[in-house]
Image (cartoon, rainbow, N blue to C red):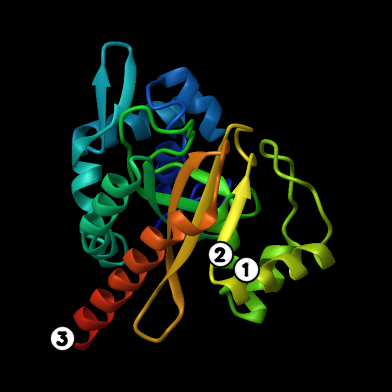
Amino acid sequence: MARSSGGKSALSRAVRVLEAFDPSRNELTLTQVAARAELPMATAHGIVAELVELGLLERRGRELILGVRLWEVAVRAPGVFGLRETAFPYLERVRDRLQQHAQLGILQGGEVLYLERLSAPESAINFTAVGGRIPWYATSSGLVLAASASPEELSQLLALPRQRFALEPQVGNADFKNRLARVRQEGHAVTRGYIHEDSTAVAVPVLGPYGQAVASLAVVVPSEDFAVEPVLSVLAPAARAVSVKLREAFAG
């Protein structure tokens, strides 16, 4: 593919335009897109026009939003769509049993990407969103997935900078390794007050066909009167059931 004088391909620049949108800013003007994608206005204008023509972006007055066609393409990815579809009924059961947020996440680089979130009326305060990302060290899902990572993957995670995201404690690598060892031994992670002081998150791993953690199943519950065992009695069996379904799908 032809490259610009700056060494970036047209596809690379288009991806930067799409990545300018996130759950907190899902409606952007062309000027905002150009600034967030760090592209000249003329370049951004041309890319946006083509993405709109393809249905990957849509216009809403002066603002742009991600297009429905982008979603249609994204959900075909088997590593995301199949996992989400398999886990969805079990997420529903967790949500219904606990009457709190239930969510599914995967590790993408140094962040947890949330594939699904189901909520109940009057649930605990929760700032995660479908398609949203949180640094791995600031969430129970990230801790449980990091605890299941290979030594090489864990070293890569620990080598990344850990800027303060919300209220999570800031500790060194030695303390983190000890924490992750406990998570690995206990089979779950608890982050109390990491994102909001009134909320606690609990996560357990979902295992793939070869026994590796491919995702996390988590709930966000009120911190007041929190007890982990009632949560795990619902969450852990659901994660095991999803793991079984994934193995069956792989074997079939």
Query: Mark 2, mark 3: which one is toward the viewer?
Result: 2
Q: Of callouts 1 and 2, which one flags the residue occurring earlier in the amino acid sequence? A: 2
Tag 1: Cα neighbours inside 10 Å, few (<14), some, or many (≥20)?
many
The kind of residue on which mark 2 rests is Val
Q: Is residue 173 left or right of residue 250?
A: right
The residue at the far left in this view is 252
Along the viewing direction, whichever of 218 and 166 lies nearer the viewer: 218
Q: Is residue 143 visible?
A: yes
Q: Of callouts 1 and 3, which one flags the residue occurring earlier in the amino acid sequence? A: 1
Residue under pointer 2: 144
Tag 3: Cα neighbours inside 10 Å, few (<14), some, or many (≥20)?
few
Q: Residue at x 46, y 79 (%)?
A: 212
Q: Quadrant of residue 85?
A: bottom left
The residue at the far top in this view is 61
Q: How many marks?
A: 3
Query: Mark 1, mark 2: which one is toward the viewer?
Result: 1
Residue under pointer 3: 252
Residue under pointer 1: 183
Q: Is residue 246 left or right of residue 206?
A: left
Q: Is residue 145 left or right of residue 156?
A: left
Q: Of callouts 2 and 3, which one flags the residue occurring earlier in the amino acid sequence? A: 2
Q: Are marks 2 and 3 in contact (CB under 8 Å)?
A: no
**Vertical side of 18 occupied by 231: above or below:** below
Separation of residues labelled 1 and 3 (CA atoms): 32 Å
Q: Position of residue 45 (x, y in %)?
A: 39, 26
Q: Are marks 1 and 2 in contact (CB under 8 Å)?
A: yes
Separation of residues labelled 2 and 3 (CA atoms): 28 Å
Q: Residue at x 19, y 42 (%)?
A: 69
Name the image quarter holding the N terminus.
bottom left
Helix, strand or loop at mark 2: helix
The kind of residue on which mark 1 rests is Val
Q: Are marks 1 and 3 in contact (CB under 8 Å)?
A: no
